[in-house]
Image (spheres, rainbow, N blue to C red):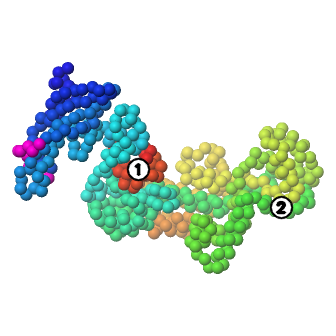
Amino acid sequence: MASETVEAVLFPGIDVRVERVSDSSDVLVVEAVSTARPGRCPDCRKQARRMRSSYQRDLDGRPLGSHRVIVRLRVHRYFCDRKSCSRKTFVEQVPGLSERHRRSSTRLTGWLRSIAIELGGRPAARLCRRLRLVAGRTRLLRLLTAPMVPDRAPRVLGVDEFAFRKGCTYGTVLVDVEAGRVVDVLPDRTSETFAAWLNAHPGAEIICRDRATAYTKAVKEAAPHALEVADRWHLLQNLSAAVEKTCHQHRHCLRKRTEEETVTEVPEPPPMLSPPAELPRTQIIERTRHRYEDIHHLLEKRWTISAIARRLSLDRKTVRRFRDTALDELFASAHERRPNGVLEPFKAYLNARFTEAQGQVSGIQLFLEIQALGYRGSRQIVRKHLAALRAGTVEPVRADIPSPRKITSWIMRPQETLTQSQDERLLQVRLACPDITRACDLARAFADLVRHRWGYLLLEWIRQAEQDAPKPMKGFAGFLRQDLDAVTAGLTLPWSSGAVEGNVNRVKTLKRAMYGRASFELLRTLILIHPSTSRNCRQGH
């Protein structure tokens, strides 16, 4: 094979001359000499005129078939003739083949960098071994360098937090909303860090954010002229939480109406003398009782909410709920959290038969009766229920009422998307409780403001909610009033944090793929470098 053919195959468009090609085992050694013009000094950029010496350096090239390629390249060292330059000599670099401090060719380095971007550390190293490329995980990770952050912030900047470790440490991701790409990643979510970034990167005219107070404070300090836009998705999420809390607080209204309808439709069985019903001594009931006693004991000693939460290893919201809620309501909530067992659909029948027979009924007979009705459980469960009926410790059969979360989903969805049965059940809920009805009307009115961007009607909605709405809805309206300008902009302008949320999900994917072992700098690099191609990046580090 002619030398020209080898050069055209191995080094197309590169100024080198192949002197020898040798094949030993699975390694192809190519000896070449640089034929490029004298290079320029890397410091002063003056072109060299005098050659000092030459030496040979080994470069790993891209594999050729099943052969690993090693390029033994002879390069020249030149003098720098500029007296003011601190560098006296320098080594030439062959464009397209060699780089400073690299032991692989330029094209192979590009391959390795692409593999590292897509796979990360150890998975990339395993793939390199299969491709006969010499590269460990540390070398691959060193090829990843974060791109430079622009000096000016994008015109429409989106900001949101993400968790390094949920509930403990958080970071901040900054997104160009118009381009849909990540601009920078900050190591925490404090207002000082974000304000410092805004001061160093001016130019943001619109800032899309959620309702985090730290970001609001930073914007007011570092970018007071920027227009803040509250995210519409977060507003609907906060509204949904307020509606669900209202439904939970008025759940007794639904149960009362259902029980009244049941009493009207079904004749009351003959009375029987039985011990008064007591709360079953289940694990959740006992835990609720002990937790209530511990919290109120510390409250009597004038402990703060935060101190009690730290002492009992609870969330502050949990401590606050036990402080403000009666024990009976907490017990009722504990009952509702108990899952429906296999016997649950048949408890009403068993209770009625037990009452009719004045307690003189066989467990085997009742078991056979409900088995004919479709019961698929064991006989022991029926015996335990009968024993609880005789002892008076059985809890009453719960009415078939929808959960607060299900009611909230019916309210928050557009009415035309509900099925006929869902619409009828929601109507029954509205008839049972006027407070839920009012919350439903306000929630649907606010959802219309969001969907149609009727920001000019927001203040009127807040006034109506503050007048006669349930307490959770009043609280939501008060939060809107505190952030009125940003919420109005969110309900008026087309900008929102959708692009930010999408990138936050991508950040979570990258973070979880690292198994929590990589540093912040590596995570930041993987987020910033080629975001369109690193979407499926995996880091088995």
Residue designated by label 2? 277
Q: Residue furthest bottom?
A: 301
Q: Is residue 154 left or right of residue 473?
A: left
* Highlighted magenta segment, given as a residue range: 43-53
434 within the magenta span: no
46 within the magenta span: yes
Residue at 24 percent across and 26 percent down: it is 22
Q: Where's residue 242, x and y in %?
A: 56, 61
Residue at 9 percent across and 50 percent down: it is 80
Quarter that holds the N terminus: top left
> Is there any visible trace of residue 246 in the rendered image?
yes
Q: Is residue 284 left or right of residue 405?
A: right
Distance CA(mark 2)–CA(mark 1): 55 Å
Residue designated by label 1? 503
Q: Where's residue 289, x and y in %?
A: 72, 66
Residue 287 to residue 307: above or below:
above
Q: Residue furthest top?
A: 1
Q: Is residue 430 left or right of residue 477?
A: right
Q: In terms of image quadrants, where is residue 300?
A: bottom right
Q: Is residue 277 left or right of residue 301?
A: right
Q: Where's residue 188, x and y in %?
A: 41, 62
Dominant SS in magenta? loop
Pick the residue in front: 329 or 109. Answer: 109
Numbered-mark total:
2
Give the label, 2 or 1, closer to the camera.
1
